[in-house]
Amino acid sequence: MNLTAQERADRREAFRRMSAAQKADYIFSYYKLPIVLTLLFAYILCYGLYRHFSRKEVLLYVACANVVISEDTAEALSGAFVRDSGKDVRKCEVLLYRNLYLSDNPTLANHQYAYASRLKLLAMIDAEQIDVVLMNQEAYDFLAENEYLATIAYGTNAVNVSRFPVFQNADFTDSVFLGVIPNSPRMASALEYIAYLESGR
């Protein structure tokens, strides 16, 4: 509907005389949809920008299978390695997957957990989101038998890291092995990680 100049002037004057609350109610009543859409668009834009600029580069994906580690050990396996590599921990990270359980003969009590862990591990390998595995003998046997470990050096597919400096205070009751997944796109970082753990820097 087209308004005359006088009608537009009357509306402007009526709007000018409204209180702040009345003006807000008037604006929201007539422009509700554009306001909601604008706010929604602004939220999506801000969230996308936040995610983009706060996302960290993953230097390495490390999984712990049948191995329980403390928070101090977790820090040595992740943040300390990032700093040792000369990277900024605000921009780079090591993703640590904990509490995986792998077994060929799980008991009835933990059968479902072992099955879920196996599916999770296979999904991570397929997505190239696992590079290194820290594991006990049972998990090592399972991964080696299924050819999930790459040859690292001297024909071996795992390194016994139990005596490496970073694990000296970890109170492991069994030997702990480190293996590298064959399809890792970060093989150079995985080898650098082994050297870091062995050096105890």
Image: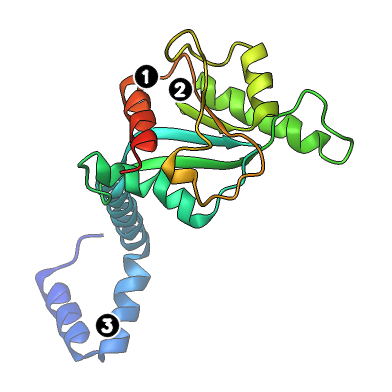
Q: Which residue is drawn at 12% across and 78% down?
A: 9
**Discs 2, 1 touching: Cβ within 8 Å:** yes
Q: x%, y% of residue 27?
A: 29, 73
Q: Quick one: which residue is furthest to the right in this view?
A: 108
Whether residue 104 is visible to the viewer of this picture, yes or no, is: yes
Identify residue for label 1: 185
- For the residue marked with disc 3, what is the amino acid? Lys
User: Sequence order check: which comes first, mark 1 or mark 3?
Assistant: 3
Q: x%, y% of residue 99?
A: 63, 43
Q: Distance between the residues labelled 2 and 3?
A: 56 Å
Q: Is residue 86 left or right of residue 26?
A: left
Identify residue for label 2: 128
Residue toward you, 57 or 194:
194
Q: How far apart are marks 2 and 1 (CA)?
A: 7 Å
Identify residue for label 3: 23
Q: How crowded is mark 2: few (under 14 residues within 10 Å), some or many (20 or more)?
A: some
Q: x%, y% of residue 126?
A: 52, 19
